[in-house]
Image (cartoon, grey):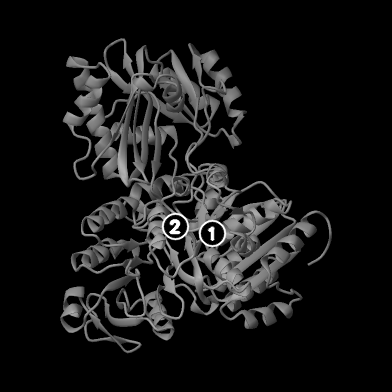
Amino acid sequence: MKSLVDKDTRVIVQGITGSEGSFHTKLMLEYGTKIVAGVTPGKYGHQVHGVPVYDTIESALKEHEADASVVFVPARFAYNAILEAIYNDLSPIVVITEGIPTWDTLRLVRLAKRKGIHIIGPNCPGILVPNETKLGIIPGHIFKPGDVAVISRSGTLTYEIVEALSNSGLGQSIAIGVGGDPIRGTNLVEALKLIEEHPKTKKVVLVGEVGGVEEEMVAELIKKGEITKPVVAYIAGRSAPPGKTMGHSGAIILGEAGKPESKIRAFESAGVPVARLVTEIPDLLKGI
Amino acid sequence: MFLYEHEGKMLFHQNGISIPKGRVVYSPNEAINAAKEIGFPVVLKPQILGGKRGKAGAIRFANNEEETLKIARELFNMELYGEKIERLLVEKKVDIAHEYYLSLTVDFYSRKPILIFSTEGGISIEEVAKEKPYLIEKRYLDPDIGLTPFIAIGVLNKLGISGESAKKFVKIFTNLWKLFEGNDLFLAEINPLVLTKQGDVIALDARVVVDDNAQIRRAWIGELKSKRTGKESLEIQAKKLGISFVILEGNIGVIGNGAGLTMATCDTILELGGKPANFLDIGGGAGPERVASAIDLIMKLGNIKVILINIFGGITRADNVAKGIISAMQTLNLKIPIVVRLRGTNEEIGREMLQSVGINAYTDMIEAVKKAIEIAKGGNER
């Protein structure tokens, strides 16, 4: 595949003038991300860390060429912002915003898929390719280039795992935080299919959690041989009681669906080692 | 958020789905008054958020005032699936001719709504699926088209319902869709949906789950939340502070940043032989005040032996966490040991600040967890 993002990806930051947007624009620039413009309605003519700000994506595209977008726009206004990015054919659209109503996400993702656009998130930390680029808020300094992809429904847990990998001499090819909402533009299955085609990746760490059936679906694909790169899994939320939202609104056990035991069983029956502790992940990776 | 049966039924009523005449009561005396007003016989149904009440024998019928009082007293003294019964729904008993099942769910995986209808209601749909799958119709819906009359009729016909009675069901189907789609619901389940001997179609139960994220545009979600009591009210109070809080049953208080890391912290405690008292995610970029409120919340749980704070700071700054811990120790006059694991942004500053109040922060998560478990099991000191 043409990598989802790389050092040449040109990025627009939507919601660049907000405190999160501006703070992370600075960190992304420091990491090497090619940010060509920012968008915040009503802020045309401003600059954020040297990045020119426009009222709309359309006006930004008149002055700059861009491929992708990172969205920091608050939940209340995020639907329109994402719609604008879809309308202007940016891809991927990385949505950091937390708290977007799920029915809105459902509609946006349907639209995006019709146009062949990738949405990552919402409620996600973004994508990072070590020493090339990052779209989002993942801290760069913990990464080392290598051949392990980390696909995760969680942010901080990803950082924990990446650091454990780096400390054990296992570098990373890419990290994708798919997000913590119940419906996301790219789910674990879709992320894994992308990684299957990713030339730099040899092994995968898949970080799932309670809620939903994506982990079971991944296990199914592995059984069928559609995913051939070796995977090590970790499932967060074994301590979660049923019916409670564990921070991520997607992390909820509804009836039989979403229980951690079912996910762990599914992986084990597909021959995927499941780490009980984060610290076991590097050794399991070395063993596959 | 899960809704109580009576809250779900109110939504049904407002959206043209018939429900039995009923009232919510909070005491046995209120139950008698409600029953008299509604007219005997009545059914008394405990309002809890989880579990199967019928199987637990907690759905009871009363034919007169004495029975109502006796049953209401018993129910108010009960605990069901770990929930104390604080409200009862008193309803007119309905003459049932047949029980059906109807639900709309958002299927997160396919990103589509699903309609499920069965001519076998009143028991769990999983049981029907196991024993008589041919009595269930399941349809993936196109969100742009919704649940239209032609889809409803198709489903009903398939299960042998047609003519006049089908018309009444079609109305329920389409009204339920409007409610479901127009209120950001994840689940709207009617089990049973009954045909009465008088020929009416009525929702006898309501299981409704609403998307918490939709509170930004649905004021009623916030209004329902503000009426919640008990354990749940603490969790809702936390949410207002930007904190995700879920009460568990152990004695190790847990604070983390990020949902995944916090879950993993709770899991690791379990894995290594301890018991987490709670899940508490302070969220991204928490300042010292939020950290202090988090400690305060956990102290309200009682029976806490130690608090474990696990931070891997990205947006969250370790020095802010340290400030929060120190201020909580002082203002709450904290006697309980705190174990801290600190990584990430401004880690060194945070570490030094904590040292000044006698806390040696760990860098390794597993070591910190082990220490917390040791303290909880009676080993001493920070």
Secondary element at tag 1:
helix
Proximity of marks 1 and 2: CB atoms separated by less than 8 Å: yes
Question: Quick check: A244 above or below B367?
Answer: above
Q: CA distance from mark 1 to mark 2?
A: 9 Å
Name the residue rendered at 48%, 51% in the picture: A251
Q: Which residue is mark 2?
A: A180
Residue B300, horizontal then vertical, whole percent: 65, 54
The quarter of the image holding the N terminus of chain B is top left
Where is residue A9, by image quadrant?
Answer: bottom left
Residue B299 shows in the view: no
Name the residue rendered at 66%, 46% in the picture: B249
* Three-letter residue code for mark 2: Gly
Query: Which chain letter matches label 1?
Result: B
Residue B312, horizontal then vertical, whole percent: 58, 70
* Three-letter residue code for mark 1: Gly
Residue B133, horizontal then vertical, whole percent: 38, 22
Question: Quick check: B72 above or below B13?
Answer: above
The quarter of the image holding the C terminus of chain B is bottom right
Residue B260 badge:
1
Residue A225, horizontal then vertical, whole percent: 44, 49
Give left or right: position of B258 versus B253. left
Secondary element at tag 2:
loop
Give left or right: position of B150 versus A26. left
Give left or right: position of B112 versus B86. left
